[in-house]
Amino acid sequence: MPPPSDIVKVAIEWPGANAQLLEIDQKRPLASIIKEVCDGWSLPNPEYYTLRYADGPQLYITEQTRSDIKNGTILQLAISPSRAARQLMERTQSSNMEARLDAMKELAKLSADVTFATEFINMDGIVVLTRLVESGTKLLSHYSEMLAFTLTAFLELMDHGIVSWDMVSITFIKQIAGYVSQPMVDVSILQRSLAILESMVLNSQSLYQKIAEEITVGQLISHLQVSNQEIQTYAIALINALFLKAPEDKRQDKHLNPLDLPATDMANAFAQKHLRSIILNHVIRGNRPIKTEMAHQLYVLQVLTFNLLEERMMTKMDPNDQAQRDIIFELRRIAFDAESDPSNVPGSGTEKRKAMYTKDYKMLGFTNHINPAMDFTQTPPGMLALDNMLYLAKVHQDTYIRIVLENSSREDKHECPFGRSAIELTKMLCEILQVGELRVIMEVLELAFSILYDPDETLNFIAPNKYEYCIWIDGLSALLGKDMSSELTKSDLDTLLSMEMKLRLLDLENIQIPEAPPPVPKEPSSYDFVYHYG
């Protein structure tokens, strides 16, 4: 006969004592189980202790998470999160540097647990850590190692979302940005500093502005030229974050040196060109295989880069805009030079000039020979196709001229007109590369959920609508023996409660409510109903 589902068999350890093998009844209060464990080792004050996992992140076990305990799990008896937080708070401010370093190591490990993090933050632990970083006393022994653990603990605590990133001071931001901009800094400090700046940028628009004023594009790009792929990954992650927050008006500013651009101009076209060159030479063509996280960050950067083209892709050409029409004139001028310019033909009039233009536009391969601007009124590809054509004409002029002249002299059945081909090719590339189609929207994020069926494996889903999302979440919660907490369940409960209140109010008014529902009427003799209009 299988054991009851509410009973789990575990081993519980305590330093210097033999492990206890227990059968835990999940229906019993956790405090009662901890008291039983403490009594087994004759430990007083069981309220000072709690249970946590012995392996992995060693997370604390609470009433909310105890259902995750599996048969055969090894647990530890440990001091409670509140006592641990209080002790570490005192030790992190000790005058003994060795004791402070040990405290920071333990704090960095425990901060990943949300239960401990809540207790430590409630004791103003974040304020203490920021002050330690702001002091920047480099004369202390073990300074680099201690700072690395301090930054790790700070990042872990903030990642729980218990407090807002906006509480961070300008002094702290300058200190962290200083570690990123320094040419020679400990790798562990640099890695954590990049991660902290990324979180600040993603979680606060006001902090984005402050951080962007402290670092330049060149300082970030320099971290892509190192041999440490972890540093490269964190640097690209920060670049992506700055890219996401970059205001639209900063994306096309022209500067002579892209490395001197402030980080607010991360999406600037010149900075992007230099960034792509560095990534190609030092990351993609590097002598190390690209890891999963690096591949993901490169993918995100590629999506963000392509999305910059969306505005031009969705912009129709205005046939009355002289600046836009001048681009078409430039394409014609480069292809046929001055030899076909009607102004050089003696006695050329308006009609002859129009005929010459029409002939040239036909040779360029436009569909509308009279007004080629009309070829760019379809979106996509819109003005992006014209941008690509002009780039080819100016940067690869010989190739452009050869393509135009070769196709203009072919037979009709073999023709591949440059204009039409360029427009269709641009449209095809926009579809293949999904330009502008991969922006994450909050509505989609709210419909996503994951099933963890193995410590390292998950099944990820996106529900087609809110109703099905609620059905899935409630169904999975019911299977796991947890409360159903979706918005749909709450709405149903509200409806039932409202109905119950109405019934009780009717009862207070002495209005008789029948115990049984009214009888269902008999079926009609036939269903042939006729309605006569008046």
Image: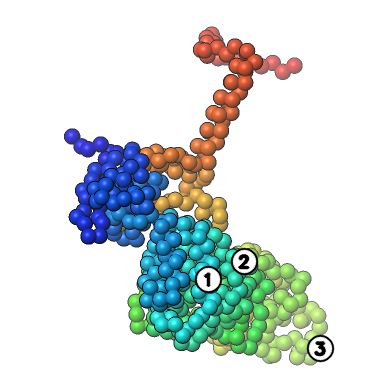
Residue underneath mark 1: 130
- Using the image as rendered, state which of residue 480 and residue 174 is in the foreground: 174
> Which residue in the structure is indicated by mark 3?
347
Which residue, given by chain and number where applicable, does mark 2 sit on?
Answer: 205
Q: Is residue 471 above or below residue 339?
A: above
Where does residue 72 sit, x and y in percent of width and height? 23, 50
Tell me which amino acid carries mark 3.
Answer: Gly
Q: Nearer the viewer, residue 405 or 479?
A: 479
Q: Left of 63 or right of it: where is 400?
A: right
For the N terminus, give its image quadrant. top left
Element type where label 2 sits in the image: helix
- On the question of residue 106 being in view, the answer is yes
Residue 233 appears in the rendering: no
- Which amino acid is tagged 2? Gln
Q: Nearer the viewer, residue 344 or 300?
A: 300
Q: Position of residue 439 (x, y in %)?
A: 55, 61
Which element carries disc 1, helix, strand or loop?
helix
Which quarter of the figure has residue 337? bottom right
Q: Earlier in the sequence, mark 1 or mark 2?
A: 1
Q: Is residue 325 left or right of residue 472?
A: right
On the image, the x and y values in percent for residue 344 come to: 75, 91
Hey, what amino acid is under mark 1?
Thr
Question: Contact, CB < 8 Å: mark 1 with mark 2?
Answer: no
